[in-house]
């Protein structure tokens, strides 16, 4: 209706996915990089989440335009399927022939497996993309996990990319889905646009539509950002109705009152501090309202935003990388995890501003953060782990008598074990990333990320570290349990030998068959001297430190005085 009035060749704020209006903010580019990473790695899940209207479908369309020639894509748009329907749909997408009488879960999985093996033999990679994945049932999610078990000796045969709303993250955090969550090799949560990006987004769409004049002043862009919370779909609906109102009023640019009336029509009301969740719900409502925009525009309702509106309190703009994954999370040596460092939150800007910040240098390479951290840690042990997620790398390590230990603790724990580790760091103005803590010297630490090594203060490390870590250690032969008083076996004999090395006994005590009270007393002395939890029990933290005593090639955080 207003296109001719403003000189547009087409409606600039249509919610139709027209590729001409594609606007890729830095957040969108980062999310796309994570999905492209999913096309390159072997096996596991890649997770992209975001609120309604933030642009997940737009990113997926960009991904499909960049699929390598040797990659086969299966795309499921309707996730409200049971297990049988999911497998049948996957067969349809991959053009796997299945007759009606053969439709059972076993038959379908066998057919899919044969197809994947054949594709792999021809040098082709197969990727399954599921949109709106928050609607998948627990049973279907478990079947998807089982599909990622299909593999050869060298690689997984199926990569799965899940797109969904934030509820999907909550689903995958449930205990019954922990096995699937541990197979996520990359994850990203798409946040709304920033204030600067909102202005660039609006001007981009106006320019593509052929607009010549400046319709939204800076003050109205500020207002639009506060009203929409930076959600692209909601921006489109509000701007469309604001232009309609401006046309009806006969103006040449959008006034504050007109913008507020448009937002009132879309949102129902505009409170002083607009809740982020309500913005999301209003985005979906705005889509329905947009169809009858001309008929719905009317005057005379009270201005819902006569006072000063504060910006929406956005969630932290950070991706959530895949949690370092090992077959199982190890239990602490004692009842509580000693040495856990406090986590600095976004509500503590004063503390975060002190000292130097550990900042990821190249945003466009963020998708490699996990693979680079893994490579750096494994290189300390002389192991090669190229472009692998933590889970795949830990499986590789297990075949070479190594084990991954994953814990949530802090710097004191790592210093007690004296072991390099992968740590997750918070960035001041960007997504979280994984780095490798290589060494500690006094109050300085040496860390590796983005392929480079940096020296930082321990104070900076504590402020930006979540406290969780993954380390690598060489398993002693036959080790399989936590050892305590009264236990017998070869692992007890190994503990006694390691204690003898630490005590400097010229002739180590003969292997004892039982973990006696005397051995427990010696163990407590060892734990006390190294800063380990002093409980007399030989748990994973203690074993890591004991194992290093007889292995001169063990990498350490701090060199010990002879």
Image (cartoon, rainbow, N blue to C red):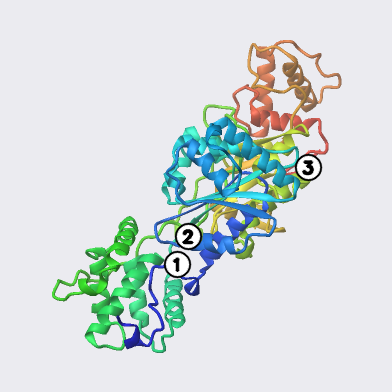
Residue drawn at (24%, 65%) of the image: 270
Q: Position of residue 420 (x, y in %)?
A: 70, 44
The residue nearer to you, when weighing 489 against 80, is 80
Q: Which one is earlier in the sequence, the residue at label 2 or at label 3?
A: 2
Q: Quadrant of residue 365?
A: bottom right
Q: Nearer the viewer, residue 376 or 5?
A: 5
Q: How far apart are the two marked residues, 2 and 3, measured between alpha carbons?
A: 42 Å
**Quadrant where the N terminus lies?**
bottom left
2 or 1: tag closer to the N-terminus: 1
Q: Residues within 10 Å of mark 1 (few under 14, many from 20)?
A: few
- In front: label 1 or label 3: 1
| Disc sitting over residue 106 in the figure | none
Q: Which residue is mark 3?
A: 381
Camera sees residue 366: yes
Viewer-proximal residue among 419 and 170: 170
The residue labelled by disc 1 is 17
* Rendered image quadrant of residue 554: top right
**Left or right: 244 as drawn, with respect to 212:** left
Q: Which disc, if any, is residue 57?
A: 2
Q: Are marks 2 and 1 in contact (CB under 8 Å)?
A: yes
Decide if residue 339 is in sight here.
no
Label 2: few (<14), some or many (≥20) within 10 Å? some
Q: Position of residue 409 (x, y in %)?
A: 56, 39
First of labels 1, 3 by sequence position = 1
CA distance for labels 1 and 3: 49 Å
Q: What residue do we see at 24% from left, 88% from top?
A: 250
Q: Report helix, strand or loop for mark 3.
A: loop
The secondary element bearing badge 2 is classed as helix
Q: In the rendered view, would you say 164 is above or below 9? A: above
Nearest-to-viewer mark from 2 and 1: 1
């Amino acid at each position: 209706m207003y296109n001719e009035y403003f000189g547009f060749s087409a409606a600039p704020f249509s919610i139709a996915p027209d590729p001409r209006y594609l606007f890729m903010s830095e957040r969108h580019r980062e999310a796309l990089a994570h999905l492209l990473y999913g096309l390159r790695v072997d096996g596991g899940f890649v997770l992209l989440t975001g609120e309604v209207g933030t642009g997940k479908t737009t990113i997926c369309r960009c991904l499909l335009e960049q699929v390598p020639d040797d990659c086969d894509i299966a795309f499921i748009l309707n996730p409200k399927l049971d297990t049988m329907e999911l497998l049948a749909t996957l067969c349809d997408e991959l053009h796997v022939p299945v007759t009606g009488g053969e439709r059972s879960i076993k038959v379908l999985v066998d057919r899919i497996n044969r197809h994947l093996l054949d594709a792999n033999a021809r040098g082709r990679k197969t990727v399954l993309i599921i949109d709106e994945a928050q609607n998948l049932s627990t049973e279907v999610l478990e079947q998807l996990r089982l599909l990622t078990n299909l593999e050869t000796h060298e690689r997984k045969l199926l990569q799965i990319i899940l797109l969904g709303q934030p509820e999907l993250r909550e689903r995958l955090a449930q205990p019954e889905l922990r096995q699937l969550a541990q197979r996520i090799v990359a994850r990203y949560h798409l946040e709304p646009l920033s204030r600067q990006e909102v202005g660039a987004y609006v001007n981009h769409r106006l320019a593509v539509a052929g607009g010549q004049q400046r319709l939204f002043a800076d003050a109205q862009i500020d207002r639009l950002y506060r009203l929409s919370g930076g959600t692209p779909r909601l921006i489109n609906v509000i701007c469309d109705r604001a232009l309609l109102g401006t046309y009806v009023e006969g103006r040449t640019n959008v006034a504050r009152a007109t913008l507020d009336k448009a937002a009132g029509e879309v949102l129902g009301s505009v409170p002083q501090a607009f809740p982020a969740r309500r913005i999301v719900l209003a985005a979906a409502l705005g889509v329905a309202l947009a169809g009858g925009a001309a008929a719905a525009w009317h005057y005379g309702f009270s201005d819902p935003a006569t006072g000063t509106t504060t910006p929406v309190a956005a969630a932290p703009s950070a991706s959530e990388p895949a949690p370092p994954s090992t077959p199982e999370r190890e239990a602490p040596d004692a009842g509580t995890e000693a040495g856990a460092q406090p986590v600095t939150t976004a509500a503590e800007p004063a503390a975060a501003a002190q000292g130097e910040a550990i900042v990821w240098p190249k945003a466009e390479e963020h998708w490699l953060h996990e693979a680079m951290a893994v490579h750096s840690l494994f290189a300390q042990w002389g192991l090669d782990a190229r472009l692998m997620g933590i889970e795949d790398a830990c499986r590789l390590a297990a075949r070479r008598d190594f084990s991954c230990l994953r814990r949530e603790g802090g710097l004191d724990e790592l210093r007690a074990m004296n072991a390099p580790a992968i740590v997750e760091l918070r960035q001041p103005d960007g997504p979280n990333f994984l780095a490798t803590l290589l060494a500690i010297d006094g109050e300085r630490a040496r860390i590796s990320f983005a392929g480079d090594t940096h020296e930082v203060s321990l104070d900076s490390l504590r402020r930006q570290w979540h406290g969780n870590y993954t380390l690598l250690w060489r398993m002693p032969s036959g080790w399989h349990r936590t050892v305590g008083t009264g236990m017998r076996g070869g692992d007890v004999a190994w503990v006694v030998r390691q204690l003898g090395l630490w005590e400097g006994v010229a002739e180590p005590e003969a292997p004892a068959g039982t973990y006696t009270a005397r051995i427990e007393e010696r163990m407590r002395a060892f734990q006390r001297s190294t800063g380990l939890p002093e409980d007399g029990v030989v748990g994973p933290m203690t074993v890591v430190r004991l194992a290093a005593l007889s292995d001169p090639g063990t990498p350490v955080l701090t060199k010990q005085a002879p």
